[in-house]
Amino acid sequence: MQYSAGRAYAVWWGPIQPGVPVPVTAKLSRKFYDALGDAVANELVEWFNRVDLTYRTELRDLNEVNFARFDAKLDQRVATLKAEIDQRITALEAKLDRRIVEVRAELRQEVARLDARVEHGFAEQAARVEHGFAEHAARVDAKLDGLRTELIKWMFLFWVGSVGLALAISQLR
């Protein structure tokens, strides 16, 4: 950075860098220099620069203090917000755990109800099948009884025919 201090003012050119004091640009009229003289006018410019530096320093210190307060408040608010979020998450986890327990209980009840329905359905089907077998067995027994009767009848006729034939042959002899 470069600056040029003239008789009545300081001229600043180049980039401004943080932490480097910037002098006040005070341009005083030629009449002022003639009335006060160069020494007094330059001293007045230097005084303006010192006042400016003092104000800048005070402003920088005030900004640092304000930023520190802001940073502390921000940290406090972030911590408070984090605590609230943690509390809400904990509450939601507890609520979710309760709901999971409720859903499990409901599912167990539903499974038990379905199991009972299935058991009842199997029992009904077993009863129907057993009844069907019983009916079928009764029909088979009835048919076997009829077949037995028919068989005995034919056996009797065969036996009577055989005895009759044996008697007839024995008389022919």
Image (spheres, rainbow, N blue to C red):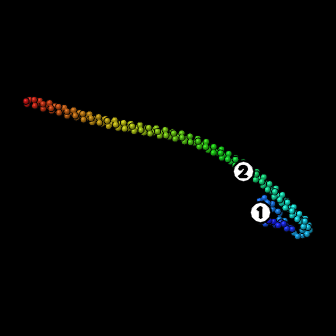
Q: Are there few (<14), some (14-19), or many (20+) residues within 10 Å of tag 1?
A: few
Inter-mark Cα distance, 2 to 1: 31 Å
Q: In this view, does 164 lie above or below 69?
A: above
**Percent position (x, y) of residue 126?**
39, 37
Residue 142 as seen in the image, left or right of residue 43: left
List the residue tagged with mark 1: 16
Q: Which of 43 and 148 is in front in this view?
A: 43
Residue 103, image quadrant: top right
Residue 129, image quadrant: top left
Q: Which residue lies furthest to the left in this view?
A: 173
Query: Label 1 amino acid?
Result: Ile
Q: Quadrant of the N terminus?
A: bottom right
Image point (89%, 70%), residue name: 31
List the residue tagged with mark 2: 74
Image point (76%, 64%), residue name: 15
**Percent position (x, y) of residue 93?**
61, 43
Q: Quadrant of the C terminus?
A: top left
